[in-house]
Image (cartoon, coloured by chain):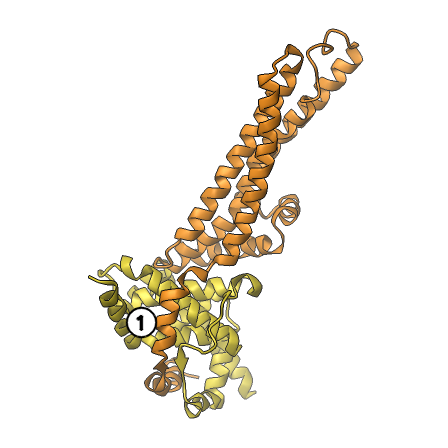
Amino acid sequence: MEETNFVLLWKEQYEKIDQSLAINRKILQELTSQKAASTLQSFIRFKTRGMIAAVIYLLLLGAVLFYAVSHYVSAANYFIVSMGAIFLINLKALSDYIRHVVLVKNIDYNGTVTGIQEKLSGLQLSVIQHSRFMVLQLPFWTTFQLSGTWFPHTVGWGYIIFQCFITVAFGLLALWLYKNLTIKNVDKKWVKVLVEGAGGKHLVKAISFYKEIEAFKQ
Amino acid sequence: MTTSDTYHRFLSVIELHKGIIYKVANSFCANAEDRKDLVQEIILRLWKSFESYDDQYKYSTWIYRVALNAAISFHRKEKSRYHIQTPLSEGIFNLPDMERNHLADQRTMFLARFIAELKAMDRALMLLYLDEKSHKEIAEIIGITETNVATKIGRIKQVLKQKFAQLNT
């Protein structure tokens, strides 16, 4: 088939349709006046549920931390430092979450197709950035139970070495994950496994679409 | 400008370019219900970005950008997520059945089918080509260089030609 025929065929198909197409003005008015907020409601609701859960978790952490600080005893030093770090890291995750919701709400589709689609895929993939930061709390979960009254002076070298090994191992694992859990590495199998675990099927779809746009632009 | 003035200006722009919205929705959704949802989604997106419309571009460029972005996003997401929460009982577009039958022509049906088989970005590109947009305008809408537009269109046309040739064998 000649190339001009594609265009002619297309024109033929849509020319008459274009002439006969009528707009239901009543529906259009209803849509633009009342239903404007419904577009991404379900997605926003999903994110809001996450935010409520994160706020409750932070309130609990905050309450425990507040109690420990207001009833300060030197024995709670490890607990206060560990919980403080965990609290701050989770607070940062919540602020990222809120930023995510605001970004989704404010996306204007009036941009180039590759630009907007990349932005949307990037937004979906930002969950990777969230999980990336969250891993930094790992080593603090190995120290919060220690007490200044018995650690390190009343325990044996074996326990000290074991504790240091566990904390350093979790610290190194956290740093390694933080460094490698990036969008650039989405092709790696272990990243895909972690991402699937964190966000489900739609993230894997977003990854492949992100790659598709990258390939398309070349 | 009052909200009413803005709405009437919006209405006249949509009236003038309704064919673009229909074509995009038709090319990205085979199912009538999905198509109705997508048309609503496109109109909502257009309405939301109407105030920020940049008059250095033609209305058709703006409509194509918003409509294609909405269609590709709609196409990508799981249906349940994007399904409009409070669907309208009727569609925004009314089309007499006799006009719909134009689609029944065999060659046009195959062209529509082959285009539907393309990847989302290639499909967007092809829609613009078939609507006789210049390479410059396609580049502005899609966000790639004019040279890249020409190369990609050439490749897609080859694929379509091969598919039509296979039909004849």
Q: Nearer the viewer, residue A199 or B82?
A: B82
One can see residue B9 in this view: yes
For label 1, the residue is: B133
Eyeballing the image, is B71 above or below B145?
below
Q: Residue at x 64, y 17 (%)?
A: A78
Picture residue at 67% right of the left edge, 12% below the top: A75
Mark 1 element type: loop
- The image quarter containing residue A140 is top right
Amino acid type for the residue under numbered disc 1? Lys
Looking at the image, which is closer to me, A119 or B14? B14
User: Residue at the spot x=76%, y=18% of the render?
Assistant: A162
Where is residue A95 drawn, in percent x and y? 48, 38
Instruction: Please name whichever residue, B15 or B65, is drawn nearer the observer in this view of the structure.
Output: B15
The total number of labels drawn is: 1
Q: How crowded is the residue under tag 1: few (<14 C-alpha within 10 Å), some, or many (20+)?
A: some
Q: Is residue B47 above or below residue A143?
A: below
Q: A171 left or right of B135?
A: right
Residue with the most extreme bottom position: B98
Where is residue B151 shown, x and y percent of the image?
Answer: 40, 65
Q: Where residue B129 sits: x, y (%)?
A: 36, 72
Residue A127 picture location, percent across and down: 55, 45
Task: Answer above or below: position of A99 versus B152.
Answer: above
> Is B68 placed left or right of B53 in the picture?
right
Q: Residue furthest top?
A: A153
The residue sitting at 19% across, 61% down in the picture is B1
Answer whether residue B67 is visible to the viewer in this image: no
- Residue at the outermost left position: B1
Chain A, hue in figure: orange
- On-image quarter of the N terminus of chain A: bottom left
In the displayed structure, does residue B18 sit left or right of residue A120? left
Chain B takes which shade in the image? yellow
